[in-house]
């Protein structure tokens, strides 16, 4: 039996790359042999490729452009991704671009993905553009599915305002995403919280599973500040 293939998608600023990284770490800690493929050709920041060295030390393989092409917006690693998808002995996570254009990169792997089987998780932050209303969430879902030629299987709620996150903000996000799940017949099992704000957002809201993540991906200028530049 094949190991699980996860496809993580979401609009710009949804937190899908943070969740992809968290999921890779979690699965590795549970003993899975994990491959994380960075397929985000849309967003110049917050890419899972930025954890390649750290993940190598954990034994997690990251597929992404290398060297001078590290920050290129190009789907340059198709053969390796195809090979990972077709290798059922590894748990594979595809971190896919944050809009319908980004989802087009999945098209070249459609046969291999369907043959293997997959879970496609749509990460939603209701405080970001294009997913801030019920209508926008459902429209974005439809666009992502149409462009990727695949079907979303589950919503993940990641409503937050970073340092201004409060319980009522997350609860309102859960309410919106829950209604989108109800109207589309999809599952909503999980909401995400950064560890810095976990004390403000309790577990068990609306009977869902709370996943606490660390803040891994930083903007380039944040990295410079950390270095004292």
Image: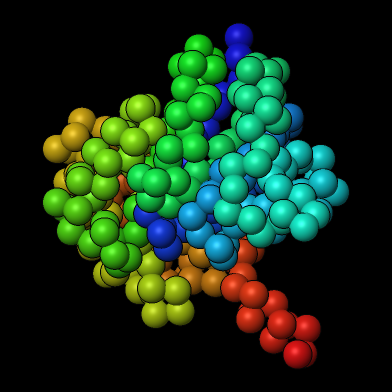
The image shows residue 46 at horizontal and vertical percentages of 57, 62
- Residue 227: x, y in percent? 78, 83
> Which residue corresponds to the image point at 52% horizontal and 32% vertical from the top-left?
6
In this rendering, the answer to whether 200 lies above or below 110 is below
| Residue 202 seen in the current view | no
Q: Is residue 122 left or right of residue 172?
A: right
Residue depicted at 54% across the width and 72% down the height: 196
Placement of the C terminus among the 4 image quadrants: bottom right
Residue 125 appears in the picture as rendered: yes
| Residue 203 or residue 227, whichever sits in front | 227
| Residue at the (26%, 57%) spot, across then down | 131
Q: Is residue 174 above or below residue 86?
A: below
Q: Residue furthest bottom?
A: 229
Left or right of residue 18, residue 165 in this image: left
Asked which quadrant contains residue 81, the reply is top right
Q: Quadrant of the N terminus?
A: top right
- Tell me, what colour scheme is on the image? rainbow
Residue 94 percent location from the top left of the image: 56, 37
Query: In the image, 176: left or right of 59?
Result: left
Residue pushed farthest right?
57
Q: Residue at x 58, y 36 (%)?
A: 93
Name the spot of residue 162 as percent of width and height, x first. 45, 74
Question: Image height check: is 71 above or below 57?
Answer: below
Q: In which image quadrant can residue 87 be found? A: top right
From the viewer's side, name the closer residue of 180 and 61: 61
- In-front residue for pair 36/177: 36
């Amino acid at each position: 039996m094949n190991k699980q293939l996860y496809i993580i998608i979401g609009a710009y600023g949804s937190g899908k790359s943070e969740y992809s990284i968290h999921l890779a770490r979690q699965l590795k800690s549970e003993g899975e042999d994990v491959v994380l493929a960075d397929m985000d050709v849309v967003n110049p920041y917050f890419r899972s490729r930025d954890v390649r060295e750290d993940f190598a030390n954990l034994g997690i393989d990251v597929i992404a452009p290398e060297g001078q092409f590290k920050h290129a917006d190009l789907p340059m690693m198709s053969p390796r991704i195809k090979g990972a998808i077709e290798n059922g002995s590894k748990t594979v996570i595809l971190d896919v671009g944050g809009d319908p254009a980004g989802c087009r990169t999945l098209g070249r792997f459609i046969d291999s993905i369907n043959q293997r089987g997959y879970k496609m998780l749509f990460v939603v932050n209701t405080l970001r553009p294009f997913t801030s209303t019920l209508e926008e969430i459902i429209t974005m879902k439809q666009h992502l599915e149409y462009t990727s030629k695949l079907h979303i299987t589950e919503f993940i709620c990641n409503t937050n305002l970073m340092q201004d996150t409060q319980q009522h903000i997350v609860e309102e996000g859960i309410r919106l995403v829950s209604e989108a799940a109800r109207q589309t017949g999809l599952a909503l099992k999980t909401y995400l919280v950064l560890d810095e704000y976990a004390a403000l957002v309790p577990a068990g809201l609306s009977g869902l599973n709370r996943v606490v993540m660390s803040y891994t991906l930083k903007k380039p200028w944040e990295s410079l500040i950390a270095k004292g530049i």
